[in-house]
Image: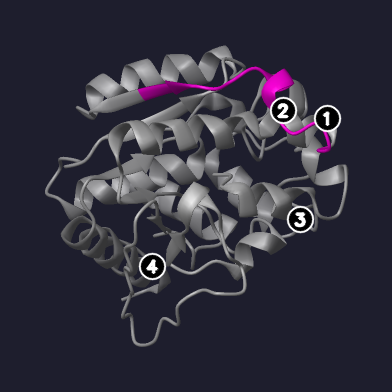
Amino acid sequence: MDDLDQLEAQSIFILREAYRKLKPLAMLWSLGKDSNVMVWLARKAFLGRVPFPVMHVDTGKKFPEMYQFRDEYTKKWNLDLLLGDCPAVEEIDPTLPPAARSAARKTAGLAAMIEKYKLAGVIAGIRRDEQATRAKERVFSPRGAGHKWDVRNQPPEFWDQYATPHEAGMHIRVHPLLAWREIDIWRYIEREGIPLVDLYFSKNGKRYRSLGDQDITNPVESNASTVAEVIAELETSRTSERAGRAMDHESEDAFERLRVAGYL
């Protein structure tokens, strides 16, 4: 097997383990490249059908292209879509910097959905290389009462053995893409022909490397207008994938504060 085959097999194993051990279970679908790869892997893992709901925690501030993609591929992929709204920014911790405070609306929106559907597990498409705080995650990461992440008290994961402790008020975050890199995602998209929101491709010399809310996400300079050109660009780029995310430039600890509180 090549490296993509190995990553695919590992992710499929993780998804099947999650489905076997955690019920009820749901998958976060943010409509971005990683999220679409995750849905694609789930369809492969379960013979073309995703056997659990996908959840979109909607801030109401996504790009129109993202909503169009969601509606189109919910039908094409026959997904059981759960939609959740987010509270107004005025209800969010005022000590957070402005962009992080806006992003934190999703934390509250996700918490409400977890409680509404009494979820034992939530599958999320994070990667270790995307942001330093995410490198502290486990594949199966317990979240305590109040959806809190205890960074310093995570279970060991040896020989692909994943612990799923369960106590009142807690749930497990499952991360099937944790071992993937950004360039792996793009190479897999190329190999599999996975559809994407076209904002990832250059228009007028700019494209988005990471998609979020319109008011806190910015494009980067790029002439890459095809998947192959994006891959070639990434092979030489030294720019951070999240360079266009406003909250990553506000304060050193803002992202970890969000993650500890239950951020996606």
Q: Considering only order in the chain, which callout, 1 or 3, is on the residue closer to the N terminus? A: 1
Q: Amino acid at mark 1?
A: Pro
Give the structural element (helix, strand or loop) at label 2. Answer: helix
Q: Is residue 81 above or below residue 240?
A: above
Q: Considering only order in the chain, which callout, 4 or 1, is on the residue closer to the N terminus? A: 4
Q: Considering only order in the chain, which callout, 4 or 3, is on the residue closer to the N terminus? A: 4
| Residue displayed at 29% across by 40% down | 118
* Quadrant into which the C terminus falls: top right
Q: Considering only order in the chain, which callout, 4 or 2, is on the residue closer to the N terminus? A: 4
Q: Amino acid at mark 3?
A: Ser
Left/right of residue 3 with respect to residue 74 in the rendered view: right
Q: Residues within 10 Å of mark 1 (few under 14, many from 20)?
A: some
Residue 238: horizontal and vertical position, in percent? 80, 58
Distance from Cα at disc 1 to Cα at disc 2: 6 Å
Give the structural element (helix, strand or loop) at label 4. Answer: helix
Left/right of residue 73 with respect to residue 93 in the rendered view: left
Residue 245: horizontal and vertical position, in percent? 75, 38
- Residue that carries the numbered disc 1 in the rendered image: 98
Give the structural element (helix, strand or loop) at label 3. Answer: loop
Q: Amino acid at mark 4?
A: Leu
- Residue that carries the numbered disc 4 in the rendered image: 7
Which region of the structure is painted magenta?
83-96
Q: Quarter of the image holding residue 61?
A: top right
Q: Is residue 151 above or below residue 35?
A: below
Distance from Cα at disc 3 to Cα at disc 2: 29 Å
Which mark's residue is nearer the viewer, 2 or 4? 2
- Residue that carries the numbered disc 3 in the rendered image: 237
Residue 36: horizontal and vertical position, in percent? 41, 40
Viewer-closest of 231 and 161: 161
Tell me, yes or no, whether the highlighted magenta stretch contains residue 220. no
- Residue that carries the numbered disc 2 in the rendered image: 102
